[in-house]
Image (tube, rainbow, N blue to C red):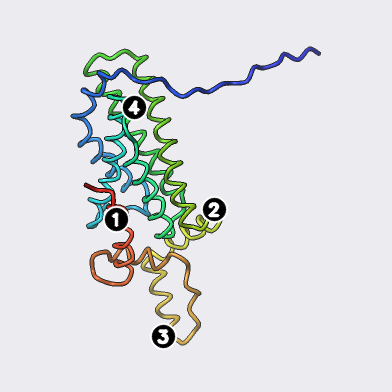
Amino acid sequence: MVHTAVPPVLTEAPGPLPQELAAIMWPELPAVAQEMAHEIGRAVPEYRPLLAGPYRTVLLHCVQRNLTTFVELVADPAASTAQRGAMCRRLGRFEAHEDRGLHCLQSALRISARVGLRRANSVGTRYSLPASLIISFADAVFACTDVIESLCREGYVEAKGGGDDEWESQRGRLLRLILASPRVRERRSWAVVRGRRAAPHAPGSGTARGLARAGTGDAGGARTATGAKTLTADRT
């Protein structure tokens, strides 16, 4: 039997988009940023308290910074990405500080990419842009998403001391979602009243409760506020 060799699939970085496209993109950014934040809050439970509270402005700034850098690179492929890099690393450190796994950020990035592509399709129809340009735009969005994820991971791993235990991240997420249930909190309270030993404190569970009470002045809110200050350190 003759086996035919299959050539390897080569992937290349997408080429630059037409610089003129930036002029079409700039007016879309405010609405796109708001839509991305809304969809992230709707689809990622861990971010819902933040996006519904006083820190929405902080996280919206992160979204806007990434969008701005993307369009700046379309207008000028040699534009500086230093602010984006610093902000994404801070965001990664913030996630580690809040004891969330990287899966939360990855989900948010995928959602943002989908929102961006939907808007590109709408704008493309409005301006009768060729399909080939929309495809190139999609390639650029995916490449940008990969870069953002890599930068966030750098900050995350640095804050974690050079390692990321994915199993512990998934376990922490499950515990936070369970502890958010009023029925579970009620059972734990009765266990204390009856003198039974309460379940061990779960890493990060205090963070979840702190987020739900953000802005009330308790320790959890203060912890989140510290991370939020870290995120805004690059704002001008």
Question: In the rendered image, which quarter contains the N terminus?
Answer: top right
Q: Are marks 4 and 1 in contact (CB under 8 Å)?
A: no
> Could you say which disc has been placed on residue 118 in the image?
none
Q: Which residue is mark 3?
A: 193
Coordinates of residue 185 in the picture (x, y in percent): 39, 71
Q: Which residue appears at 50% of the width and 82% of the height?
A: 197
Q: Amino acid at mark 2?
A: Glu
Q: Which residue is mark 1?
A: 50
| Number of other residues with Cα within 10 Å of mark 1, as a class: few under 14, some 14 to 19, many 20 or more | some
**Nearest to viewer (mark 2 / mark 4):** 4
Assign a secondary structure to mark 2: helix
- Mark 2 vs mark 4: which is more N-terminal? 4
For the residue pair 81 and 210, the one nearer the viewer reads as 81
- Mark 2 vs mark 3: which is more N-terminal? 2
Q: Amino acid at mark 1?
A: Leu
Q: Amino acid at mark 3?
A: Val
Q: Which residue is mark 4?
A: 78
> Could you say which disc has been placed on residue 166 in the image?
2
- Mark 4 vs mark 1: which is more N-terminal? 1
